[in-house]
Image: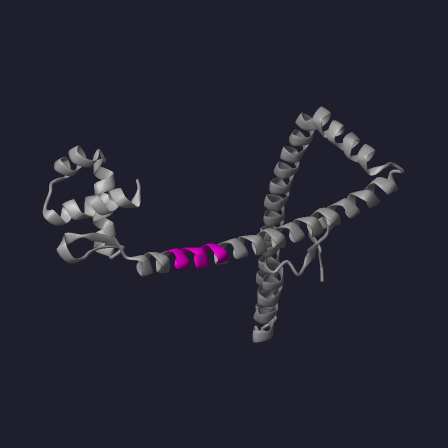
Amino acid sequence: MSESTELQVAEMLHEGKTYREIAKELHVGPETIKTVREYVAQGIIVIGEGGKAVLAQPAKKEIEQIHTEVMEVITKKATQTALQNAEEDYALGNEIRQYWILKAQEKGMELRDYVRAALIFYDDYEPQVKEMEERLEVADLVFQQLRADIVRQEKLRLYYEFVRYCLYLKSKGMRITPEVTDSLWQDLTLLEKSEVKMVGGGERVA
């Protein structure tokens, strides 16, 4: 849409013409008329003497200047971000490359051959690798449950020893001192914090 058409639409709007009348006379769509109405409301197009519409050049230039400044900032920021990402990607890629070069050297192979062989191996044995990983997860879960059972059993053993010792002291007519109960509490606390290692036969070592 040309500027002259925009100005004509603005003048007809100022005259009170309807959208249908403007569209029929100037062969423009309703969206164009709506846009021109917004330009008038924003002061981009102003109605001068005699109902003559003119383009408010200062306002338009100001808007264009703001747009240019915003685009410059965005472009600059995008460039900085792209450069930063590129530097980080390069550093990470170089670190990974150096690591696998050392792994390849340990096998007496070139990096390309080592990576190709590793990929072929994983592709050939992927089902077995996944199955092994699943079994390791199950084994770890069983170990954790077993370890919890061992700790509970050790706590019970400590409690039975404490009761038996208290009965022994009572049979000898001796008083159960706070040190006795404190000792049991400390042992139970150590077990809770896994600071006591369990060994075969249910014995405890610090």
Is residue 136 in view?
yes
- Left or right: 9 with respect to 60? left
In the picture as drawn, the residue positioned furthest to the right comes out as: 108
Residue 86 relative to residue 8: left or right = right
Residue 168 in view of the camera = no
| Residue under the image location 21 percent in, 44 percent down | 8
Q: Quadrant of the C terminus?
A: bottom right
What segment is highlighted magenta in the picture? 64-72
Is-magenta flag for residue 168? no
Residue 70 at x, y = what percent?
44, 57
Q: Foreground residue, 68 or 60?
A: 60
Residue 157, how many percent across, how many down? 61, 55
Quadrant in the picture for residue 33:
top left
Query: Which quadrant holds the N terminus?
Result: top left
Q: State whether the magenta stretch is mostly helix, strand or loop.
A: helix
Coloring applied to the structure: one colour
The residue drawn where x is 62% and y is 53% is 83
Q: Position of residue 23 (x, y in %)?
A: 18, 35
185 or 98: nearer the viewer: 98
Q: Residue furthest top?
A: 124
Q: Position of residue 67 (x, y in %)?
A: 41, 55
Between 154 and 87, which is closer to the camera in this rendering? 87
